[in-house]
Image (tube, grey):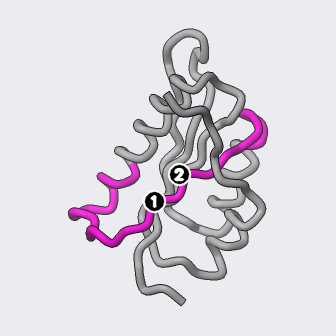
Amino acid sequence: MSSNLFHFCIVRSDMTFGQICAQLTHAAGESAALFGKPLPPETIAVVLASKNEEHLIQIKEKLDHLDIEHVSFYEPDFPFNGAMTAIGVIPRKRDKKIRKVVSTLGLMKGSTL
């Protein structure tokens, strides 16, 4: 098993490419800041997809249940008006607890510019 830290971010796939990028940036920035120190350069960033807000809420509930530290991002502006759009898991080692959550999620796939 790798000794590297993993920085998992989960974002809704039912948004436009630009919205996904913005919400992912919020979740990654806030969760990295909560790590409390600079991330090691060998930290592995993983972007995962949820189907929609309901699915993202289910993922949050699993993280809460397993006491996995994370930050949920709620976009206050139109067109989301306070809806949850992304989750950033505080960077951590990959273990059985986090695998229970992320193993069912696919990698985010998107278009390239």
**Which stretch appears magenta?**
31-55
Residue 76 in the image: state x and y as whole percent. Answer: 50, 19
| Viewer-nearest residue: 100 or 61 | 100
Instruction: Kindly identify the residue that appears in the image at 67 percent across and 63 percent down.
Output: 102
Q: Is residue 34 above or below residue 13?
A: below
Residue 74 in the image: state x and y as whole percent. Answer: 53, 30
Question: Which amino acid, mark 1?
Answer: Ala
> Is residue 87 left or right of 103 when viewed as pictured?
left
Q: Residue furthest front?
A: 113
Instruction: Kindly identify the residue that appears in the image at 27 percent across and 68 percent down.
Output: 41
Instruction: Kindly identify the residue that appears in the image at 62 percent across and 71 percent down.
Output: 98
Question: Which amino acid, mark 2?
Answer: Cys
Query: Which of the labelled discs sits on residue 9, or is there none?
Result: 2
- Quarter of the rendering occupied by the N terminus: bottom right
Q: Is residue 90 above or below residue 13?
A: below
> Is residue 94 left or right of 40 when viewed as pictured?
right
Instruction: Kindly identify the residue that appears in the image at 52 percent across and 58 percent down.
Output: 46
Query: Which of the labelled discs sits on residue 110, or is there none?
Result: none
